[in-house]
Amino acid sequence: MDVERKLAILADAAKYDASCASSGTERRDSSDGKGMGSTAPGMGICHSYAPDGRCISLLKVLLTNACNYDCLYCVNRSSSNVPRARFTSDEVVKLTLDFYRRNYIEGLFLSSGIIRSADYTMEQVVSVARKLREQHHFRGYIHLKTIPEADDALITEAGKYADRLSINIEVPEEDSLARLAPEKNVRAIRRTMGRLRLKLDEAQEDQATATKAKPPRFAPAGQSTQMIIGADAASDKTILDTSANLYGSYKLKRVYYSAFSPIPDSSRALPLSPPPLVREHRLYQADWLMRFYGFDAGEIVDPTRGMLSLEIDPKLAWALRHRDRFPLDIATASREDLLRVPGFGTKAVDRIIATRRVTSIRVADLARLHVPAKKALPFIVLSDFKPSPHQLDDARLAERFKPKAEQLGFGF
């Protein structure tokens, strides 16, 4: 099989893994005149986005889509009737370098099916990164998928060459993983996450205490994970509780949510149709609230339903459930309270705080502060505006905010 055909198979097989954003890495030094690659933005094959909105382009492939495991939700499971292919490490290295030279990509996201053993698979994945860094002086971004229960020395070596490591938690509940992916063990996955956190903490401490010699690096962009949404009956509350636990226990940089996609010849244990894609989007918005807006997982989801609204974003839904907290006087409110106002993003809040130190804020100023007036006005008091007393008690208020075609985004 030629390389072009392998790429067609293995790039398509990799599309189900969402955990490939390349934010948070460090720039590698190329002042010695050697090296190629960059973590600067560019156009490419797989588009991921950093929190600041930069577009990141990656070559996203599997080393092989052959796998020993028979996970029911995976198109590459051992019992699946799909074409199989396998790259050699040299083929992936050459593809990465060729694509970079053509300015298609700025980095590599590499994962693999499990073949032979965890250690064997991990060694094959690491060998690609090793050759790129040591033989070809590649300075671009590398994200490697970590194989649960791989030898500790292999994980250490992976962190030496990769900017980010990830291991997928797969589904939010242990019972679901045992039913849908019987060969996988959630405790083994979490053990590997724990080992990664310890190594990341050690590297951070070494960096902080280093005096002269630069300490060995270890995955400076941290670790991430992915959960499949809609393959089981887990509620949004369960999903967000699991994410909050993962963030707290393992200091993950990101949890990615991937809506389940029905696959050919699927098991009867799986749903016949995918969840609405807007559910995936609402989970990302809720995740943003936990990481940047000071919300706890338990307060984001309506406790009577256990699910996020598909019609309005989770911050607006929270505000409508807590109308007694509003309207908020933005001249005196704390930053923590301002972050809970619908329509106020983190940058807008910082602009508001800076502006109110020198002048009062009026309705006409909202556009300059990049605040959507229609969304925010029912919840705030300005120097020239105060919502009517009955406005927040209007039973039709929620209906006013249901968009016909909401523009996706995280500034809410």
Image: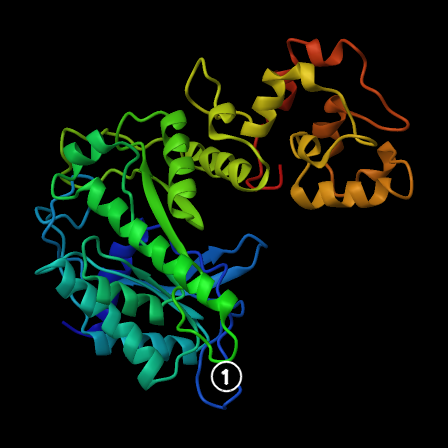
Q: Mark 1 points at which residue?
A: 30
Element marked by disc 1 = loop
- Which image quadrant: the N terminus? bottom left
Q: Quick one: 340 or 149, which is closer to the camera? A: 149
Image quadrant of residue 182?
Answer: top left
The amino acid marked with disc number 1 is: Ser
Image quadrant of residue 73?
Answer: top left
Query: How far across and how far down the image is residue 96, in percent?
Result: 34, 74
Query: How far across and how far down the image is residue 229, in percent?
Result: 33, 35
Residue at left offset 31%, top offset 53%: 15
Q: For residue 220, say whether it is visible.
A: no
Q: Quick one: 391 or 263, which is closer to the camera? A: 391
Residue at left offset 48%, top offset 33%: 282
Q: How is the image coloured?
A: rainbow
Residue at left offset 15%, top offset 32%: 179
Q: For residue 159, say whether it is visible.
A: yes
* Up/down of 364 relative to 132, above or below: above
Query: How far across and how far down the image is residue 142, in percent?
Result: 38, 67
Query: How far across and how far down the image is residue 359, in percent?
Result: 91, 40
How busy is the neighbourhood of tag 1: few (under 14 within 10 Å), some, or many (20 plus)?
some
* Up/down of 156 relative to 13, above or below: below
Q: Quick one: 390 or 408, which is closer to the camera? A: 390
* Up/down of 303 relative to 135, above or below: above
- Which image quadrant: the C terminus? top right
